Amino acid sequence: MILQVKGLIAGYEPGLSIVKGASIHAAEGEIVVILGPNGAGKSSLIKAIAGLVPVTGGQVLLDGRDITAVPAHLMVRQGLAFVPQTENIFPLMTVEENLRVSGGILPRSGVSPRIAEMYEAFPDLARQRALMAGSLSGGQRQMLAVARALIVRPRVLMLDEPSAGLSPKLVAQVFAQLQEIRSRGLTIVLVEQNARAALAIGDRAYVLVEGREAHEGKAKTLWDDPIIAELYLGHRRAS
Amino acid sequence: MSLQFLLDGVIAGSMIGLGAIGVTLTYSILRFSNFAHGDFMAWGAYAALAVVGALGGSTALKPLSFGLPLLVALVVAMALTALLALVLDWLLFARLRARGQSIIVVMASFGASMALRSLLEFIFTSRPTYFSRAIQMATPLGLGIKITADQVALLLLTLVLVVGMHLFMAHSQRGREMRAYSQNPALAKVVGIDVAAVVRATWVIGAALACASGVMVGVLVQIRPLMGLSLLLPMFAAAILGGIGSVRGAVLGGLIIGLSEAAAVQFVGAEWRQAVAFVILMAVLLIRPIGLFGVAER
């Protein structure tokens, strides 16, 4: 088990936890989808795993190592990369600078070859390498954010709603890219509002309700599960 | 008409610009206006003076008014001023920053400024002092402009520091990290940037350049505890005119302020010099608050 989260409790203010004892896991090479109604704590859960929300209880293990108390900026060294939902690139730096600044933990001579590999995987970015990242389109920004996270060769890639604000066509592109990345052995944890698209590429899925997992199942069959429709879609309609 | 004011303006502008680099970096990375920045200049100048004294005084490299001891003292004083900034951050600013209200940090910098200034007056008295009292001969350049060897040397020093600073910010990994952190501190952590190292680099660079600027003022004008305070407003005006966060903006802003001040002295009257920075500052804030090279907040 590459990623194991056991009874995680986390929140921005003491006594007000948003994540209330969530337990999830991901096996090597798996795409795990985390669904749930608005306010269920999906986003806070992966931010807490990434060290960005204070954790008050529970444990995060990466490949058996306890990374619960590791500060956010040291997470990439542990092999855990995170793509936030918004503001996930540096807009006033070029595409290439975005990649370069994110490769700080690589050996100095290894940065340029690694950037070349990223350009090979994301040809769109190669064409725009000298452009300010802030001038990229929504889909390209998302690609850059993913490439930026991959540059340090993480073992687990976590994404917070990568489909947010993208057209269906671009969502398909980004998700196809994620499948391609997984096929190279990376583990992906995906928080999504767009349940249908996420379940189509996922292996397993959790439904988070009120800060903890309420349901777990195979991604392919989860969409048709009546419990899920009630728990998840019911809430969504209400909001 | 003598065009001497152009040279005077460029020289004053260089000193303002060097100081403004630190103001703009502190504001964009540590997110507060450091009103003690001017006092780094004064402390830097006095530190250099003390080191020159310890080295047994200045033996001038003719035609300059200073020699090797001052150059050694400059390097040592830059390191000492950087150390002062780091200690001040550790003692005061870091603790207040952690509470997250930038106005408290700004007010604390006012207090730090007064304390630093008073300490200098206590140790060195408020009487002006000099690196050298030698009179320098100025060489005519034509069009009524005369330049001294000291002025040439210090303009060259400014050029080296500014170009070096530009290359550092544009091409070094730490420079990229500093820019990244100023654009998005949360994302900087996510991509693995060591925030503490970025903060240290910001203080070291800002304070070292303030020291260089203070030593320049000391060589060309005089050294006194209030020297930094009187350049504080022009430095802020330069940083805001250039666009907060922009190193080249700070330098260009400094030159514009310096030239405007010199022009005011030439065409309006010396008593108006101080008003110029203030007028430019107000005009920028009203007309183009993001400055020449600034980018609108997202």
Image (tube, coloured by chain):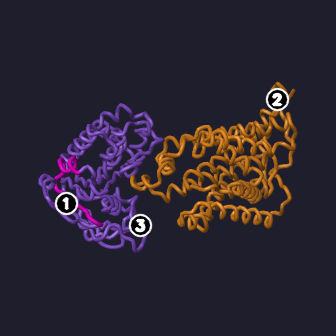
Chain colours: A purple, B orange
Give the quarter of the figure containing the N terminus of chain B.
top right
Element carrying mark 3:
loop
Q: Which residue is mark 2?
A: B3
The residue located at (32%, 44%) in the rendering is: A147
Q: Residues within 10 Å of mark 1 (few under 14, many from 20)?
A: few
Using the image, tell me which numbered label, if any, was put on residue B133: none
- Labels 1 and 2 within one chain: no
Nearer mark to the viewer, of 1 and 3:
1
State the residue lying farthest toward the front.
A238
Could you tell me which chain the residue with mark 3 belongs to?
Answer: A
Q: Residues within 10 Å of mark 2 (few under 14, many from 20)?
A: some
The residue located at (21%, 63%) in the rendering is: A25
Q: Which residue is mark 3?
A: A12
Proximity of marks 1 and 2: CB atoms separated by less than 8 Å? no
Measure how far apart labels 1 and 3 are at the Cα level. 29 Å
Q: Position of residue B281 (x, y in %)?
A: 70, 44
Amino acid type shown at disc 1: Glu
Which of these two is toward me, A116 or A56?
A56
Measure how far apart labels 2 and 3 are at the Cα level. 61 Å
Could you tell me which chain the residue with mark 2 belongs to?
Answer: B
Amino acid type shown at disc 3: Tyr
